[in-house]
Image: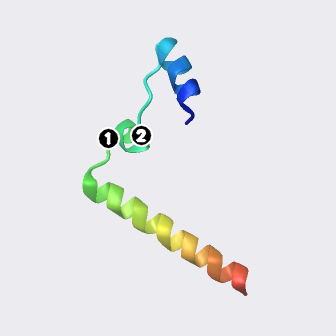
Amino acid sequence: MHAAKRKKLEAAGWKAGSPVDFLRLSPAEEAIIEMKLSLANVMKKLREAK
């Protein structure tokens, strides 16, 4: 998020944070999500190559 947009939202009373904070994920859950995203990216590249 751009700094100007973040400042505007915070001035309006919104709280900016990360998805991990919002979803209250544990470090293990965060690692699983990162692993799944990496796997999805690899699979996408392989499909595009074919």
Task: Please state if 35 lies on the left or on the right of 12 as rendered.
Answer: left
* Residue type, label 1: Arg
Residue lying at the far left of the rendered structure? 27
| Residue drawn at x 32%, y 41% as measured from the top left | 24
Disc number for residue 50 = none
| Residue drawn at x 57%, y 25% as measured from the top left | 4
Disc number for residue 18 = 2
Rendered view: 40 above or below 20:
below
Rendered view: 18 above or below 7:
below
Task: Please state if 41 lies on the left or on the right of 21 as rendered.
Answer: right
In what element is the residue under mark 1? loop
Q: N-terminal of the two: label 1 or label 2?
A: 2
| Residue drawn at x 41%, y 40% as measured from the top left | 18
Rendered view: 23 above or below 37:
above
| Residue drawn at x 43%, y 42% as measured from the top left | 19
* Residue 32 rendering spot, x and y as whole percentages: 36, 63
* Residue type, label 2: Ser
In 3D space, how far apart are the residues under numbered discs 1 and 2 (Cα atoms)? 10 Å
Q: Mark 1 points at which residue?
A: 24
The C terminus: image quadrant:
bottom right
* Residue 33 rendering spot, x and y as whole percentages: 41, 60
Pair 1/2: label in front: 2
Task: Please state if 30 lies on the left or on the right of 41 as rendered.
Answer: left
The N terminus: image quadrant:
top right
Most foreground residue, 14 or 32: 14
